[in-house]
Image (cartoon, rainbow, N blue to C red):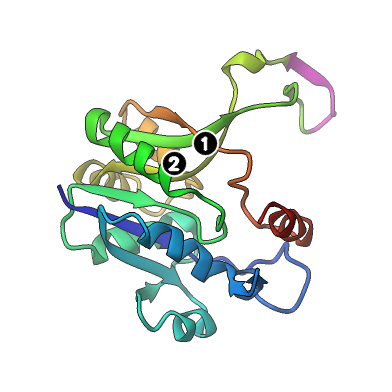
Amino acid sequence: MKISAIIPAAGTGSRYSTTKHKLLEELGGIPVILRTLEAISSVKEITEVVVCTSSPEISNLLQGYKTIPGGKTRQESVFNGLKALTNPDLVLIHDGARPLISPKIIRNSISIAAKKGAAIVAVPAKDTIKRVNPGTGEVIETLNRKELWNVQTPQVFRYADLLKAHEIFAGQDFTDDAALMEKAEHKVFVVQGSYKNLKITTEEDFKIAQSLL
């Protein structure tokens, strides 16, 4: 079974307030994007990795990896990545800004996807979640926390299924590949993740990642 990975890394990092791109920040002496790629590459079942980026600095840093231009949206970047792969059986999508993912979780997600077709890493919600009217701020309902999970990456799918879903819904703005697959009426299954597998979006996230490391 051939397994490929796509690393979306084309975001501008606008919520990260320093002038340096968040993926180039050194986490324990290693740039965030390289830490992410080291974790993915440590899983020997993955034999092809494509990084989608619009940053010349990131491309220059990743001389040993295949890089392609990112799109205007995450969905477009992943679609570009899918078209650049060499027809794998499974494709794994993992955020470039999640450097603390463990090889064990990666392998678990691959195992479930191989059996069931689609797997996403997630953790149970810790907080009570309420639906709120965005116009008035009024609470509409309190959701059942036992049914709520915070979705992370990696997300792993049968390549042919995900490619077809991207072709059908091209030009839209799905921020999550699992949501796109659900829209295409595929069943998606959850794999237990880790609260340490945070996505670095703000400076506070980076400080938390430093302390976890």
Q: Residue at x 50, y 70 (%)?
A: 34
Residue in the foreground of this view, choosing between 72 and 69 = 69
Residue in the foreground of this view, choosing between 57 and 136 = 57
Residue 37 coordinates in the image, percent (x, y): 44, 65
Residue 67 coordinates in the image, percent (x, y): 37, 75
Instruction: In the rendered structure, find residue 176 and report the number of the disc placed on it.
Output: none
Residue density around tag 1, few if under 14, some if 14–19, many if 20 or more, within 10 Å: many
Instruction: In the rendered structure, find residue 105 and report the number of the disc placed on it.
Output: 2
Magenta residues, as a range?
135-141
Q: Secondary structure at mark 2?
A: helix
Residue in the foreground of this view, choosing between 168 and 28 = 28
Tell me the CA gap for discs 1 and 2: 6 Å
Residue type marked 1:
Gly
> How many marks can you see?
2
Q: Residue at x 77, y 33 (%)?
A: 134
Residue density around tag 2, few if under 14, some if 14–19, many if 20 or more, within 10 Å: some
Q: Residue at x 48, y 83 (%)?
A: 61
- Find disc 1 in the rendering and name its residue: 193
Determine whether, in the image, residue 16 is placed left or right of residue 184: right
Indicate whether residue 139 is drawn in magenta.
Answer: yes
